[in-house]
Image (cartoon, grey):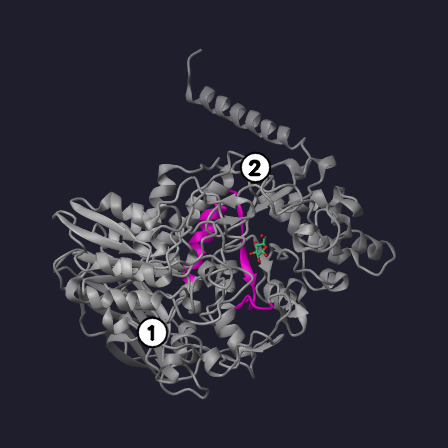
């Protein structure tokens, strides 16, 4: 057949018709099963097909970590998993105990304090992509993380799971993680919304917080998670607010999260966070987990019908005490969560323990480790020349991925600091001394480290043995800090003080006297006191970095990586230098906790009171130095809805390439209310070669200048002068420039 334009036209028309028939062919499927249909249409169609019992059934757990689907309609169940740093090993149907699977070891990524300490949104994206792939491969639909509770007290046992003291930093660092996890068809469950800023009495304490503090400090990271991150689920916290448990709370869930913010996802209770049937029905809870199972030493095993959003709810629906409209809203939210995850067929398949995930863990750790002090250039050590170094401290060999609560993991491998250092030591001989005995356990929920940390020597003998070897070592690396034992960095318990535990101060003091070439490495998720700070030349905060902890620490110690981490929280000299403690507003026995320090959390308090911190928020050194030019503004004044640009040249003034986190803080010089001296409103991590200069610019927008006006119950911008501070830390401002809001 001779192909003419006319025949081509007929052919293409026939093709289009055939395709559209094929299209309508799939529409023979019920709408809720047709992935070409918009999700809302699918939700409505599914809802219209469900019975009352089926709608209630999907609102509560069916096992420790899963909830039912609708088997009759082929709507799959939801499988959730901890945690924020890696995928928790499988547990038995209705237990916290291990299921004993042999295919569920994972990569432990650095704790979220380490991620926040990178001040690098690309690291957050890499983190979310990697952990999302591990969750997907393990066939999980909801990842119970990340956590973004603000660091109010250095004693909070779960600070290691969160992103520090500043709402802007946490808001920026949580978003890419969320977006990348969810690209795998796995929902995040951002936690613990909200005001869960201590572990002491976590199920009982009522957080008493004024509105301005709530909106300026404790909500922004969750709001960013919803609005920028697009989080598909949020976890209610255990504590109370305004007398209601937050897992069913009119104010935080209905008024703010769902009505004001327009959150369209599902609110999932923390495990055992639901305490009242009527409140669970009316105050915004959508998916109830952890109630009345034996995991919380309450109720019967497999007692899922005794949940609040189960038989009790059905009863109220049948006798007219509960409305179907509210039921349908809950069911819609859970169905939306299912359609976004379990019921999606176009999901990637994920991967587990891949080289890429180990590289990601290492890269994030490399960028998160913070060089706090480095005089006399103790670091980096030179592994190319023969010599002898002594490593001292239990944390040099203690595995940290087991323990600490629900974020505990069963890793495929964990490179401990001592092994990482030995692998990278080159011509250096590496010796080890225990130095002190901390926590010799190594088990959680049936996962064991297998390490034998038993020790028979006395504390004095341990110090003597370490000092004997320190005498003629070319360098000494002390590796201590906290651990994941109860009352250290651990869920469901807070620390009792800021001090290092286990007599570590004595060990450090003794070593400092013997060898000035001493570097102290703190492995922790919290600030610690350092009474020996002036006697030690080098100090590193190495966080909990998971599977690649030892590799990354060695990268920094031997200079393979130039450290670029910055503190996401203030390290106070004393506990009383922290606002909550200065005002005696942290009380281990109080079931009503008034946040008396208000918005003055972290550096905001230190600057208000002019209290010099041990190490400031945003502090972190490099093996090179950076110089800053003078900041300039694109305009001297802007209208209330205007924007301007602040620019500054940053130069690498040293001998080696490095990354700097250029930080922008803004202060309101004439406000009708008391405001912090300055607040973080921008940061940029840049890599500079020796001698290289880069112009860094920040756009200042009106929202960055506002405060929450409790009288107007809204954000307010007042005219007057503001000052933009640009620097390398909150206490290291290199240049500043003022501007006017007309
Ligand atoms: C825990 C934690 C929460 C965790 C959940 C499931 O109590 O508070 O973060 O995701 O229960 O383990």
User: Which of 734/603 is in front?
Assistant: 603
Q: Quadrant of residue 738?
A: bottom left
Element at badge 2?
Answer: loop
Q: Residues within 10 Å of mark 1 (few under 14, many from 20)?
A: many
Q: Quadrant of residue 434?
A: bottom left
Left or right: 728, with 264 as reference point: left
Residue 119 showing in the rendered view: no
Sequence-wise, the earlier of marks 2 and 1 is: 2
Left or right: 136, with 75 as reference point: left
How many discs appear?
2
The residue beneath circle 2 is 100
> Does residue 292 sit above or below 459 in this rendering?
above
Q: Pinpoint residue 432: horizontal percent, then vertical percent.
A: 28, 51
Element at badge 1?
Answer: strand
Q: Write down which quadrant ligand 1 falls in.
A: bottom right
Residue at image location 41% in from the left, 60% down from the top? 113
Ligand 1 is within 8 Å of the C-beta of the residue at disc 1 = no
Q: Pinpoint residue 375: horizontal percent, then vertical percent.
A: 18, 67
Left or right: 536, with 610 as reference point: left
User: Which of 155/364 is in front?
Assistant: 155
Residues rendered magenta in the picture: 172-201
Quadrant that contains the C terminus = bottom left
Q: Pinpoint residue 8: horizontal percent, then vertical percent.
A: 45, 22
Q: Residues within 10 Å of mark 2 (few under 14, many from 20)?
A: few
Residue at image location 22% in from the left, 59% down from the top? 470
The residue beneath circle 1 is 665
Of the numbered discs in the image, which one, if any, rests on residue 291?
none
State the CA–CA distance, disc 2 to disc 1: 50 Å
User: Which of 316/274 is in front?
Assistant: 274
């Amino acid at each position: 057949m001779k192909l003419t334009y006319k025949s081509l036209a007929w052919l293409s028309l026939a093709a289009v018709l055939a395709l559209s028939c094929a299209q309508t062919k799939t529409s023979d499927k019920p709408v809720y099963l047709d992935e070409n249909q918009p999700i809302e249409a699918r939700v409505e169609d599914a809802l219209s097909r469900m019975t009352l019992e089926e709608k209630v059934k999907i609102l509560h757990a069916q096992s420790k970590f899963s909830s039912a689907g609708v088997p009759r309609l082929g709507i799959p169940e939801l499988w959730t998993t901890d945690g924020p740093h890696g995928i928790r090993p499988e547990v038995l149907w209705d237990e916290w105990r291990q299921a004993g699977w042999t295919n569920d070891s994972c990569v432990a990524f650095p704790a979220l304090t380490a991620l926040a300490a990178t001040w690098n949104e690309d690291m957050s994206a890499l983190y979310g992509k990697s952990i999302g792939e591990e969750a997907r491969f393990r066939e999980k639909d909801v990842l119970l993380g990340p956590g973004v509770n603000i660091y109010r007290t250095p004693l909070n046992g779960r600070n290691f799971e969160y992103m520090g003291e500043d709402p802007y930093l946490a808001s920026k660092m949580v978003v890419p993680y969320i977006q990348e996890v969810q690209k795998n068809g796995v929902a995040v469950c951002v936690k613990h919304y909200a005001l869960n800023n201590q572990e002491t009495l976590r199920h009982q304490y009522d957080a008493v917080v004024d509105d301005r503090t709530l909106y300026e400090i404790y909500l922004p990271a969750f709001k960013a998670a919803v609005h920028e991150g697009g989080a598909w689920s949020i976890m209610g916290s255990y504590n109370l607010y305004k007398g209601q448990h937050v897992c069913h709370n009119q104010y935080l869930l209905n008024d703010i999260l769902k009505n004001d913010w327009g959150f369209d996802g599902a609110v999932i209770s923390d495990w055992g966070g639901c305490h009242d049937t009527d409140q669970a029905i009316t105050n915004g809870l959508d998916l109830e987990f952890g109630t009345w199972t034996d995991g919380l030493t309450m109720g019967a095993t497999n007692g899922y019908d005794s949940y609040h959003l189960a038989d009790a709810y059905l009863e109220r629906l049948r006798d007219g005490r509960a409305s179907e409209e509210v039921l349908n809203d809950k069911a819609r939210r859970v169905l939306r969560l299912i359609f976004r995850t379990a019921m999606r067929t176009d999901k990637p398949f994920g991967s587990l323990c891949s080289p890429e995930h180990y590289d990601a863990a290492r890269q994030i750790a490399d960028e998160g480790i913070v060089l706090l002090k480095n005089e006399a250039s103790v670091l980096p050590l030179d592994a190319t020349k023969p010599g002898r170094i002594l490593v001292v401290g239990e944390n040099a060999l203690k595995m940290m991925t087991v323990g600490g609560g629900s974020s505990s993991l069963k890793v495929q491998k964990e490179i401990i600091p001592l092994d990482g250092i030995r692998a990278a030591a080159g011509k250096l001989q590496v010796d080890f001394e225990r130095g002190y005995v901390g926590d010799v356990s190594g088990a959680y929920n049936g996962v064991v480290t297998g390490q034998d940390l038993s020790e028979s020597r006395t504390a004095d003998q341990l110090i003597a043995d370490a000092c004997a070897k320190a005498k003629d070592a070319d360098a000494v690396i002390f590796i201590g800090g906290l651990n994941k034992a109860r009352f250290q960095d651990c869920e469901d318990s807070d620390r009792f003080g800021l001090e290092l535990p286990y007599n570590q101060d004595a060990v450090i003091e003794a070593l400092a006297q013997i060898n000035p070439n001493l570097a102290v490495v703190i492995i922790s998720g919290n600030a610690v006191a350092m009474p020996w700070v002036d006697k030690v030349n080098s100090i590193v905060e190495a966080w909990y970095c998971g599977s690649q902890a030892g590799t990354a620490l060695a990268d920094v110690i031997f200079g393979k990586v130039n450290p670029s981490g910055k503190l996401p929280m203030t390290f106070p000299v004393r506990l009383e230098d922290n606002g909550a403690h200065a005002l005696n507003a942290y009380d281990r026995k109080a079931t009503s906790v008034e946040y008396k320090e208000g918005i003055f959390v972290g550096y905001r308090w230190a600057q208000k009171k002019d209290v010099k911190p041990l190490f400031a928020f945003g502090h972190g050194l490099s093996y090179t130095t950076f110089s800053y030019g003078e900041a300039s503004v694109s305009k001297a004044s802007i209208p209330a809805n205007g924007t301007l640009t602040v620019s500054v040249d940053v130069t690498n003034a040293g001998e080696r390439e490095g990354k700097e986190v250029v930080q922008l803080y803004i202060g309101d010089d004439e406000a009708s209310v008391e405001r912090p001296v300055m607040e973080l409103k921008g940061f940029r991590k840049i890599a500079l070669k020796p001698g290289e200069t880069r112009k860094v610019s920040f756009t200042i927008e009106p929202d960055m200048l506002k405060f929450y006006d409790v009288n107007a119950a809204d954000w307010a911008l007042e005219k007057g002068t503001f000052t933009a501070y640009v620097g390398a830390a909150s206490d290291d401002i290199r240049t500043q420039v003022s501007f006017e809001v007309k």
